[in-house]
Amino acid sequence: ELSSTFGNRLIEAKSLYALGYLYTESSSFDSAYHFYKDGINKSKQYNFQDRLVYFTNDLGVMFERQDLYDSALVYYLQTLKLATDQKLYEDQAFTLNNIGVIFYR
């Protein structure tokens, strides 16, 4: 909230990501989902396309940890499209690996 108050939108987006990550790691998936979705909305609003890759990927990770593979795949495919459109080759590779893990299961 402080980053929003002081007008630093990038820090706001990064903070939402960090909170989502921390909640995912502590298995508080409802809270994680809230922060990731808020981060997606802010990233779209402020045109932080590169941030969208991180939010959508981690939503996939969050769903995969809950054994919700169909939902994880939806977000991984979104991540792959975003990474491909932005020519983020390393992110494409990580995402293809994540998709492969889903199909391996």
Image: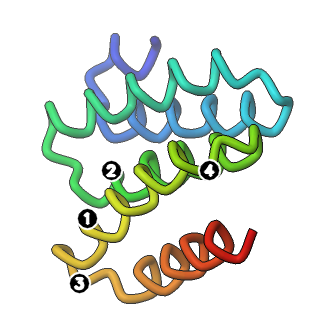
Determine whether label 2 and label 1 are within 8 Å by CB: yes
Residue nearest the observer in this picture, 22 or 73: 73
Circle 4 sits on which residue? 69
In the picture of the structure, the residue carrying the numbered disc 3 is 87
Of label 3 and label 1, which has the lower sequence position? 1
Q: Which mark, residue 52? A: 2
What SS does tag 3 mark? loop
Spatial CA span between label 3 and label 1: 9 Å
Q: Residues within 10 Å of mark 4 (few under 14, many from 20)?
A: many
Amino acid at pointer 3: Lys
Q: Where residue 13 is drawn, which disc sits there?
A: none
Q: Position of residue 5 (x, y in %)?
A: 34, 11
Task: For mark 1, give the secondary structure.
Answer: helix
Q: Secondary structure at mark 4?
A: helix
Q: Which residue is labeled 1 in the image?
A: 82
User: Which residue shows up at 77% across the image and 21% down it?
Assistant: 28
Q: Quadrant of the C terminus?
A: bottom right
Please, what is the three-letter code of the amino acid marked with disc 1? Leu
Q: Tell me which label, 3 or 2, sits earlier in the chain.
A: 2
| Mark closest to the chain's N terminus, 1 or 4 | 4
Q: Are marks 4 and 3 in contact (CB under 8 Å)?
A: no
Mark 3 vs mark 2, CA separation in Å: 14 Å
